[in-house]
């Protein structure tokens, strides 16, 4: 039996917490598709193509069974399109739990055949979030411990080009 999972998120941008979850999931599933949500209601710092490309560079060493794809609409439809029986989400702290439980139960109602699995982020990345990383970058702080190297480069370049980002 082939176990296929999607790992959906905004990934604006991918952090080391996301990468840690992707790495753990890549060892558990035969195929892992990292799904980047193209949400027209949000104004992301990085375009959908930029986010996909940054993730592709960041997960290059995880193996060919890990791929990246953009999506819009429902996560469960994205999972179905890829023939995935699992959604992977990371939990950093108890504070993540409530929203994640609500999403998992909503997704189960929409697609009972797709199960959400949670992976605990490594303790060292438990504090890392995309939004705080962008704030630290904006004010000139060192973001290298928080994000994969390609993301750190891209964020630094973006802030250098426009410090108001
Ligand atoms: O990285 P994020 O922002 O925490 O990811 C949230 C995401 C993309 C997983 C969630 O917003 C999502 O699944 N959006 C797609 C729309 C959807 O399926 N909504 C209903 C179930 S929550």
Image: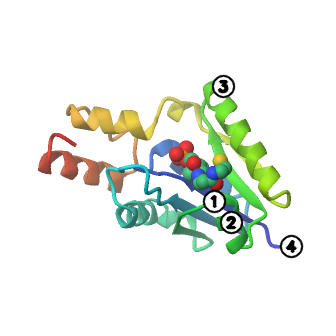
- Residue 20 in sight here: no
Q: Where does label 3 land, which residue?
A: 94
Which residue position holds label 1? 74
The tag earlier along the polypeptide, 1 or 4, is 4
Cα separation between marks 1 and 2: 5 Å
User: Dot 4: within a 10 Å radius of its alpha carbon, few (fewer than 14), some, or many (20 or more) residues?
Assistant: few
Q: CA distance from mark 1 to mark 3?
A: 25 Å
Between the residue at mark 2 and the residue at mark 4, the CA separation in whole angstroms equals 21 Å
- The quadrant in which the N terminus is found is bottom right
Kind of element beneath mark 2: helix
Q: Are marks 1 and 2 in contact (CB under 8 Å)?
A: yes
Give the label, 1 or 4, closer to the camera: 1
- Please report the residue visible at 63 percent of the width from the left and 43 percent of the height from the top: 90
Compare residues 50 and 74 and report the one nearer the observer.
74
Q: Is mark 1 within 8 Å of ligand 1?
A: yes
> Tell me, what colour scheme is on the image?
rainbow
Seen at 40% across and 45% down, the residue is 147
For residue 77, the mark is 2
Depth check: 63 or 53 in front?
53
| Residue 121 figure quarter | top right
Give the side of residue 44 with respect to residue 6, left or right.
Answer: left
**Whole-Å distance between the Cαs marked 3 and 4?**
33 Å
Residues at marks 1 and 4, CA–CA distance in whole angstroms: 25 Å
């Amino acid at each position: 039996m082939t176990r296929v999972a999607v790992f959906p998120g905004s990934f604006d941008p991918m952090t080391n917490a996301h990468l840690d979850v992707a790495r753990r999931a890549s060892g558990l599933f035969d195929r892992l598709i990292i799904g980047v949500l193209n949400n027209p209601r949000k104004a992301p710092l990085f375009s959908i193509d930029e986010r996909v490309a940054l993730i592709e560079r960041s997960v290059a060493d995880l193996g060919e069974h890990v791929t990246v794809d953009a999506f819009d609409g429902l996560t469960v439809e994205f999972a179905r399109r890829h023939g995935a029986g699992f959604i992977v989400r990371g939990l950093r702290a108890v504070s993540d739990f409530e929203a994640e439980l609500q999403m998992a139960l909503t997704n189960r109602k929409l697609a009972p055949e797709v199960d959400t699995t949670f992976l605990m982020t490594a303790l060292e990345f438990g504090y890392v979030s995309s939004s705080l990383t962008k704030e630290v970058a904006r004010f000139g702080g060192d973001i290298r411990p928080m994000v994969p190297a390609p993301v750190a480069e891209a964020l630094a370049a973006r802030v250098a080009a426009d410090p108001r980002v």
